[in-house]
Image (spheres, rainbow, N blue to C red):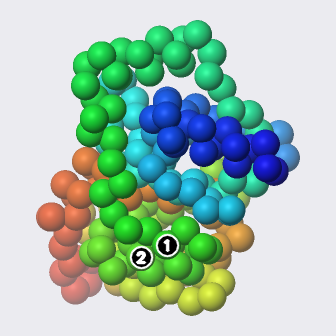
């Protein structure tokens, strides 16, 4: 674990592109990539980067990291990001307490941001996006909104042990969040 933390610290301190394979279930891996803007002994806060754009943040457990990649293609991507001045925009814009899931969700809620909360395990996959209504020691409650901005009447309870990644302050979520609405009485969902 110390070797992993040393690599994480190196990428954060040197502002190096960070690309990882995360193990989200027994034989399933997902990629995350961007620039590390914070970490604790258990979690990483990443400023997400894709196609030479910075777009929001993600948080995931360090224990899920199966592999850190910094191959020639990643180094070249990083070099372009630096040459284009895009890494100057990599900042820890928000104060997020990375102690545990409870503190993470309380921090996001205090900021007034709506997260995307995912379980990427194909056997129990879930995707919830919307306002946080409640945070307990074991779960977060999110009032899901759909692609038309309609909010569910009741929040969805999401146990922390089913969360593989949380994303927030991204273009899609921030834009949709400005146009959320309630369903009229007697309509579906």
From the image, tell me which residue sits under label 1. Answer: 97
Left-right relation of 38 to 101:
left
Q: Residue at x 33, y 48 (%)?
A: 91
Provide residue 58's location: percent of width, then percent of height: 47, 52
Left-right relation of 96 to 61:
left
83 versus 62 height, above or below: above
Q: Nearer the viewer, residue 3 or 67?
A: 3
**Mark 2 or mark 1: which comes first in sequence?**
1
Q: Nearer the viewer, residue 68 or 182?
A: 68
Q: How far is mark 2 from mark 1, CA to CA?
A: 6 Å
Callouts 2 and 1 close, C-beta under 8 Å: yes
The answer to whether residue 39 is seen in the rendering is yes
Left-right relation of 26 to 33:
right
From the image, tell me which residue sits under label 2. Answer: 107
63 versus 104 height, above or below: above
Answer few, some or many: residues within 10 Å of disc 2's Cα (few below 14, many 20 plus, some between 14 and 19). some
Provide residue 143's location: percent of width, then percent of height: 39, 77
Provide residue 43's location: percent of width, then percent of height: 62, 60
Q: Nearer the viewer, residue 184 or 173?
A: 173
Res 181 quadrant in image: bottom left
Provide residue 82's location: percent of width, then percent of height: 34, 22
Secondary structure of residue under mark 2: helix
Q: Residue at x 47, y 11 (%)?
A: 76
Q: Residue at x 40, y 30 (%)?
A: 50
The answer to whether residue 123 is seen in the rendering is no
């Amino acid at each position: 674990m110390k070797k992993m933390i040393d690599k994480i610290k190196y990428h954060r301190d040197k502002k190096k592109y960070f690309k990882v394979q995360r193990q989200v279930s027994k034989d399933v891996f997902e990629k995350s990539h961007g620039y590390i803007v914070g970490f604790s002994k258990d979690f990483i806060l990443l400023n997400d980067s894709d196609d030479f754009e910075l777009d929001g943040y993600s948080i995931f457990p360090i224990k899920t990291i199966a592999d850190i990649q910094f191959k020639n293609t990643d180094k070249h991507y990083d070099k372009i990001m630096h040459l284009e001045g895009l890494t100057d925009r990599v900042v820890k814009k928000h104060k997020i307490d990375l102690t545990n899931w409870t503190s993470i969700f309380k921090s996001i809620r205090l900021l007034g941001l709506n997260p995307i909360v995912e379980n990427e395990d194909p056997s129990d996959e879930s995707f919830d996006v919307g306002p946080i209504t409640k945070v307990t020691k074991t779960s977060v409650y999110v009032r899901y909104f759909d692609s038309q901005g309609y909010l569910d009447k009741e929040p969805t309870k999401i146990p922390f042990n089913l969360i593989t990644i949380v994303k927030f302050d991204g273009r899609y979520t921030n834009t949709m969040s400005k146009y959320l609405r309630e369903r009229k009485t007697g309509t579906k969902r």
